[in-house]
Image (tube, rainbow, N blue to C red):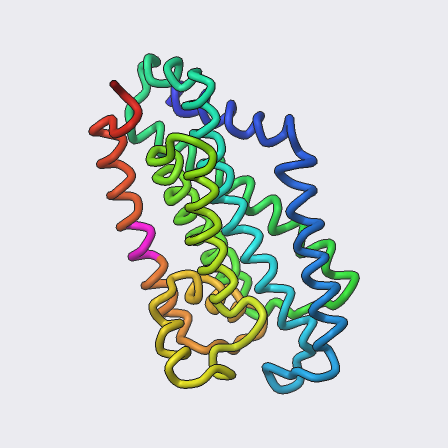
Amino acid sequence: MLSFYTLFYKEVLRVQKVAFQTLLAPILTALLYLLIFSHVLEQHVEVYPGVRYTAFLIPGLVMMSVLQNAFANSSSSLIQSKITGNIVFVLLAPIAYGEFFAAYVLASVVRGLAVGLGVYLSALWFSQPPMQYPLWIVSFALLGSAFLGAMGVVAGIWAEKFDQLAGFQNFIIMPLTFLSGVFYSIHSLPTFWQSLSRFNPFFYMIDGFRYGFFGTSDISPWFSVAVVGGCLLAMTGITLVMLRSGYKLRG
């Protein structure tokens, strides 16, 4: 476990060294979303009966921040290591590919949860949504951040330059998060778009996470946790196969 711990510590330390970029900047971005959308829609939208729109919006923004930053952590670390060439020092070390995977994903979970907690605590000034089922909140936060951390490892391995990684984030991660129900309930959409939303795994993460706050959701949280868990297992398998084969990492 020494190899795993050392790599994990290195990744967490990297986040701490540039905390303004990795922690404070995404918190500020989420608060700007909250300020703008709550100001514009607070008096015009009521998604759940008796729930203010600002309170409805906070869990979505928290989970969106968790997911985006978990992905950014592992993907940016790997692409930087590949471009600067210091990835060779990790590959030459006696570390198993399973430990390599676990260290990067766990560090991504830590950053995602840290940013999410920062967004939640900062947003309490605007509104204080209830926490009816904390266990569901923690479960979806852990599963979602682990899934995006693993996806970030895949993106970091696949990308050979920052442009490719930016394309992965701008054309896959950002659309999936923004179209996952962060700012709305899918029941407000036309039937076609409701059906299409059910193919978006990010929707189940957001919806299940929000259920932990209000006890109300568009989909059963048990079905959502099954979908997210299945996606995590599939992404874990893909990532481990890539690491084991040395795809774009060795030779």
Which quadrant: the N terminus?
top left
230 in magenta: yes
Quadrant showing the C terminus: top left
**Residue at (25, 34) in percent of width and height:** 242
Q: In the image shown, does 167 or 127 lie closer to the viewer?
A: 167
Residue displayed at 51% across by 56% down? 138
Q: Position of residue 159 (x, y in %)?
A: 37, 35
Q: Position of residue 129 (x, y in %)?
A: 67, 69
x, y percentage for residue 104? 42, 33
Query: Would residue 36 appear left or right of 58 to someone viewing this image?
Result: right
Relative height, residue 127 to residue 231 (above, below): below
SS majority, magenta: helix
> What is the quadrant of residue 153 in the picture?
top left
- The answer to if 119 sits in the magenta stretch is no
Residue 52, image quadrant: bottom right
Expressed as whole percent of the image width and height from the top left, the position of residue 40 reads: 73, 74
Farthest front residue?
A: 163
- Residue sitting at x 40%, y 19%: 87
Toward the right, the furthest residue is 125
Answer left or right for 207 relative to 22. Answer: left
- Residues drawn in magenta: 229-233
Q: How many marks?
A: 0
Q: Residue 69 is drawn in which quadrant?
A: top right
Which residue is at 63% across, 68% downward? 57
